[in-house]
Amino acid sequence: MKEKKAFTLVELLGVIVILGLIAIATFPNIITLLKKYGEKDYERFVKDLQLVTESYVNDNIDKLNLKEPGDVEFIELGDLVNAGYLSKKKINPKTEKEIELNTTMMVTVLNDKTRNYEYTGVVNGIQNYRINNLKVMYDGYNKLKENNGQIIWEDVMGNIAGVLINGAGVEDWYDNRIKLYDIANYIQIPGSSSLIPYDSDVTIEIVYEIPSEGQDLTFRNQGLGLYYFDLYTDGLILSMVRNSTDTANYWPAATSLAMRQINKVHTLAVTMKKNEDLINFNYYGDGKALQMSSATGLKYNNDDFTIGKDYTTEASVVNIYGFRLYDAALTEEEIAKNHEIDINRYSWRGK
């Protein structure tokens, strides 16, 4: 019987080359196929979360504020787990890890009164803000109310209510945001000064967005054009945005440009810390310390806080999403975390 010849080295190399070429040609298709399967798995994962959340909402509708168009609730996955609607062992195909219990489902009531369920994948809950020392908080997901002809924005902390002054009506009811569009149109916060002790440190944060129709308006004094925070009178800090020798808030042109980009959610913050007879002011834009600070020996004049009232600045157009007042000076890390939550909660609304 004739013996079969073994493959020569050249033939073996040839086979390896051919197999390599086949692998090169087919590998991208395999990757695409695997990616497609991964996307399908994630779509099923999200659909499961939507169905589970819908069941939870239907069973707990009396406890939720989901009655009228524009109503919004953030429901943490941890709440669904604790209520027995979801297993904490459920795997997120995107991360290949167990679900993060502090991420949220956003439930919104649409104009036709149907409900939309969206997995945000981020931490959106209001409780994730720095809560210690928080005295006043207006949140863009709380609907405004009308009371005896006044338009009221209720304080989440339950301390005081803001009043929209000279509002001929509130635009953007669906988005639950306040649109300031006139120099005589502002939010007054009566009683706010009584919540801050005379010798206390202070942090103020405002969340806003300038819509496209606001970009061409005049911004005087290299300010933000928002003319906000009529914090104290008598020249201490008339507004957060004014450039003036008798105020403690000098805003460079570069800062004003960055903080008035249109169609973007911004968080503007100032901390005021007592330093013997002086007050140190530090400023933060979008979670980052601005290259500026100042100190003044002027005394506190505890007037109530006002958002949107500065007689030195021309009218602008801006959407207000939130306002926070602390009787403490937050750290840069805490301010950055608050801004991150602002971005997660509000960015989709400017689209």
Image (cartoon, rainbow, N blue to C red):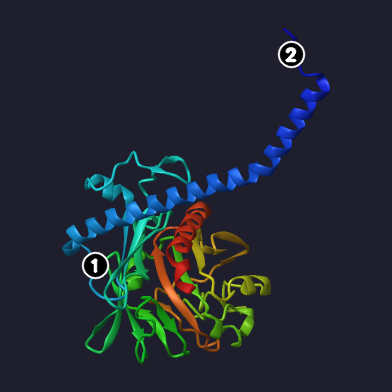
Residue 229 position in % (x across, y down) = 47, 76
| Quarter residue 71 falls in | bottom left
Q: Identify the residue shown where x is 53% and y is 44%.
A: 34
The foreground one among 275 and 306 is 306
Q: Position of residue 303 (x, y in %)?
A: 39, 77
Residue 128 in sight in this render:
yes
Between 327 and 86, the one lying in front of the other is 86
Could you tell me residue 272's position as x and y percent? Answer: 49, 63
Q: Looking at this rendering, what residue extends furthest in the front direction?
A: 1
The residue where tag 1 is placed is: 65
Amino acid at the residue labelled 2? Lys
Residue drawn at (30%, 70%) of the image: 155
Say what secondary structure mark 1 lies in. loop
**SS for dot 2:** loop
Residue 185 in the figure: left or right of residue 242: left
Q: Position of residue 186 (x, y in %)?
A: 41, 84
Between 317 and 304, which is closer to the camera in this rendering? 317
Q: Amino acid at mark 1?
A: Asn
| Image quadrant containing the N terminus | top right
Q: CA distance from mark 2 to mark 1?
A: 82 Å
In the picture of the structure, the residue carrying the numbered disc 2 is 4
